[in-house]
Image (tube, rainbow, N blue to C red):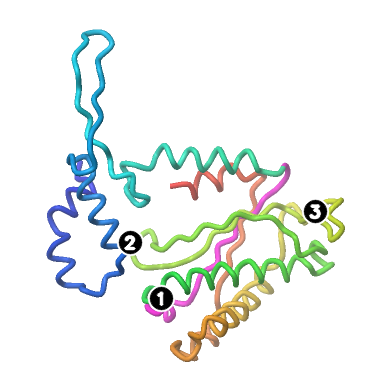
């Protein structure tokens, strides 16, 4: 089986020359994965319990994007969030951005990602506060940023696992949502776009963005689930 490490060894040097503006974080990730299990990061010596022989085990890179290093960390993440899971229905909300905006987001990753999380969170709280839906601006949700699509194209989007309800203003009662609808995505989508624009203004980046972005729909997809387990398993890797 061809591994990411083997691919990087074969093609990283040529790729880095072709794309000199590749973000530093990407370069560090490539370097870490190339050096993993090579002795660069040290080794451990283990003894066979039956035969007594010693075995040298090269340390893995442990880098976050490395698919060979993260299965254990992935399961730790799942268990942590399952312990915090509230009973009752949940919703997997996916917040996307127009394709026109993606090149800008890729060249301003840290600031832009923070802006997307802010926009998603504020939009959800504004919708939840409406008495027609939940009536409180305290819904609970972990959020995960995905930067690539299934076809390996750059496609930044957010996934939020939202509990079906929220904590009341007095923090003593729970206000449930509908079991089948956290709130209408037709209302949430334009709020999300407006919050995204506000976040870019706050970050002093608005003038660098094509104005047509704010006339294009920003889509939010909602999928109801009886509990958060399946959504967490989907997002964990």
Q: Residue at x 25, y 50 (%)?
A: 33
Question: Is 140 above or below relative to 157?
Answer: above
Q: Is residue 102 on the magenta stretch? A: yes
x, y percentage for residue 182? Answer: 71, 60
Closer to the chain start, of discs 1 and 2, is: 1
172 lies left or right of 103: right
> Residue 152, which numbered label?
2
x, y percentage for residue 164? Answer: 72, 53
Task: Give the residue pinned by disc 1.
Answer: 108
Closer to the chain start, of discs 3 and 2, is: 2
Q: Quadrant of the N terminus?
A: top left
Q: Nearer the viewer, mark 1 or mark 2?
A: 1
Task: Give the residue pinned by disc 3.
Answer: 176
Image quadrant in which you'd find residue 28: bottom left
Look at the numbered disc 3 and give the secondary structure of its residue.
Answer: strand
Q: Is residue 120 on the magenta stretch? A: no
Image quadrant in which you'd find residue 181: bottom right
Measured in 3D between alpha carbons, the distance from the residue under mark 1 to the one under mark 2, in whole angstroms, is: 19 Å
Q: Nearer the viewer, mark 1 or mark 3?
A: 1
Look at the numbered disc 1 and give the secondary structure of its residue.
Answer: loop
Label 3 environment density (alpha carbons within 10 Å; few <14, some 14–19, many ≥20): many
Measured in 3D between alpha carbons, the distance from the residue under mark 3 to the one under mark 2, in whole angstroms, is: 38 Å
Q: Residue furthest top?
A: 50
x, y percentage for residue 73? Answer: 44, 41
What range of the chain is rendered magenta?
Answer: 87-104
x, y percentage for residue 66? Answer: 32, 48
Measured in 3D between alpha carbons, the distance from the residue under mark 1 to the one under mark 3, in whole angstroms, is: 38 Å
Label 1 environment density (alpha carbons within 10 Å; few <14, some 14–19, many ≥20): few
Look at the numbered disc 2 and give the secondary structure of its residue.
Answer: loop
Q: Are marks 3 and 2 in contact (CB under 8 Å)?
A: no
Closer to the chain start, of discs 1 and 3, is: 1
Question: Is 125 above or below relative to 194?
Answer: above
């Amino acid at each position: 089986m061809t591994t990411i490490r083997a691919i990087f060894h074969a093609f990283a040097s040529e790729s880095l020359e072709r794309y000199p503006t590749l973000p530093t974080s990407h370069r560090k990730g490539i370097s870490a994965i190339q050096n993993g299990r090579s002795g660069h990061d040290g080794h451990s010596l283990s003894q066979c319990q039956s035969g007594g022989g010693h075995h040298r085990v090269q340390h893995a890179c442990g880098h976050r994007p490395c698919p060979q290093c993260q299965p254990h960390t992935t399961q730790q993440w799942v268990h942590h969030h399952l312990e915090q899971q509230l009973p009752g229905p949940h919703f997997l909300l996916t917040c996307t951005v127009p394709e026109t905006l993606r090149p800008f987001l890729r060249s301003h990753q840290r600031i832009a990602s923070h802006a997307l999380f802010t926009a998603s969170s504020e939009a959800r709280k504004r919708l939840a506060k409406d008495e027609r839906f939940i009536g409180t601006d305290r819904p609970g949700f972990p959020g995960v940023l995905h930067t690539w699509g299934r076809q390996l194209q750059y496609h930044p989007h957010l996934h939020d696992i939202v509990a079906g309800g929220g904590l009341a203003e007095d923090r003593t009662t729970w206000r449930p949502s509908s079991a089948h609808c956290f709130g209408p995505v037709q209302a949430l989508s334009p709020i999300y776009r407006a919050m995204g624009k506000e976040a870019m203004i706050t970050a002093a980046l608005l003038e660098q963005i094509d104005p047509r972005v704010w006339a294009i729909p920003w889509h939010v997809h909602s999928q109801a689930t009886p509990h958060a387990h399946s959504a967490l398993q989907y997002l964990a890797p």
